[in-house]
Image: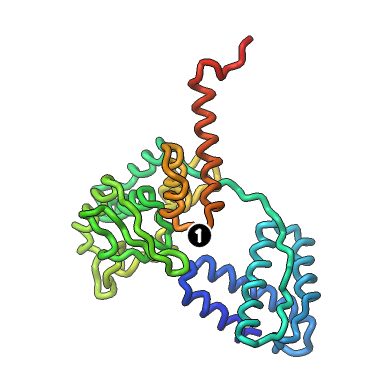
Amino acid sequence: MQQEIDAFIRLQTSRGLSPHTIRAYRSDLQQFKEFIAKYFETDVIPINKIERLFIRDYLRMLSQQQRANRTLARKSTALKKFFNYCLRAELIHKNPAQNLSTPKFEKKLPNQFTESEMELLLNIPDLSSKFGIRNRAIMELIYSSGLRISEVSGCKIRDINFTTKIIKVLGKGSKERLIPVSNSACQYLTMYLDIRLQFESVFSADYFFLSKSGRQLSADELRAILDRYINLVAKTKGYSPHSIRHSFATHLLTHGANLRAVQEMLGHSNLSTTELYTHLSVKDLQQAYLQAHPRSKKKD
């Protein structure tokens, strides 16, 4: 089974899935492989001998461990995709995960910063330092254009057109999209470009954001950098670099942006994913209404 897992992971990687998703698929499938090994007398698990019963036992075990429904749903999805791949590759004649019910879970509204908190966050980096200039440019770009961390990491110099103020992004599934860049972001991106030479090395290639060693700034390095700033602003737990992207979407919708336009900029394949932000936006509007409208307060 290990060969099949490795082949499946290579295929998903070639399709441009995020490193985070790839790691989750690999971990979930390895966990399943270790669980069902007890059904076989050898270390070699024949893929065509895996039965639906094994999968049900595996999910039951996870449920008994009181795993969250979100986790169970993710692991179920990984198994479905893996066995669909095996079926298409003619490694099996029947998909044991077919019609497997996926646990329902409530979609959690993402954490996002208020506009004043975002202003505070953006102003933390020390602009007298080359690292501060770089980090300010990174945060301005994410808040300006709603990029994922992996998309920031993969950004090339040629991807940003400062004349039209448009950035070309290669997102999930290698789907390309064009997103506007704010005047403020262009200002700090230009400032960073002026000192980018101080980061350059033989390993830099055309990557826009570089590490202190002159290499492409990886997604993990980006998260570590942003986490340090976010921890200074976030009042509660649950905030992450992705919260800046959430703030981008929420603030656009709060100020009247079209939902489908925001969907296009975020690179969501399903409108329902983007609609999560309308709940946040409406909540903000309701709060503003209750505070400001003369007829919204209860009479004594």
Is residue 223 visible to the viewer in this orientation of the structure?
Answer: no
- Rendered position, 298 above or below 284: above
**Furthest residue in direction top, as rendered:** 300
- Rendered position, 299 above or below 198: above
| Crowd tier of the residue under label 1, counting other residues whose Cα lies within 10 Å: few below 14, some 14–19, many 20 or above | few
Instruction: Name the spot of residue 194 as percent of width and height, x first.
Output: 19, 57
Residue for point 63% across, 76% down: 82
Q: How many marks?
A: 1
Mark 1 lies on a secondary structure that is loop
Instruction: Name the spot of residue 181 as percent of width and height, x first.
Output: 31, 51
Instruction: Name the spot of residue 76 as percent of width and height, x first.
Output: 68, 67
Instruction: Name the spot of residue 121 as percent of width and height, x first.
Output: 38, 43
Quickly name the residue at label 1.
269
Left or right of 119, for residue 299: right
Quadrant where the image shows the N terminus: bottom right
Residue for point 42% across, 42% down: 257
Residue for point 23% across, 48% down: 187
Comparing 4 with 235, the one in front is 4
Tell me which corner region of the image, top left, top right, bottom left or bottom right, holds residue 290.
top right
Is residue 254 visible to the viewer in this orientation of the structure?
Answer: yes
Residue for point 75% across, 78% down: 36
* Colouring rule applied to residues: rainbow
Quadrant where the image shows the C terminus: top right
Amino acid type assigned to the residue bearing label 1 in the image: Ser
Comparing 40 with 93, the one in front is 93
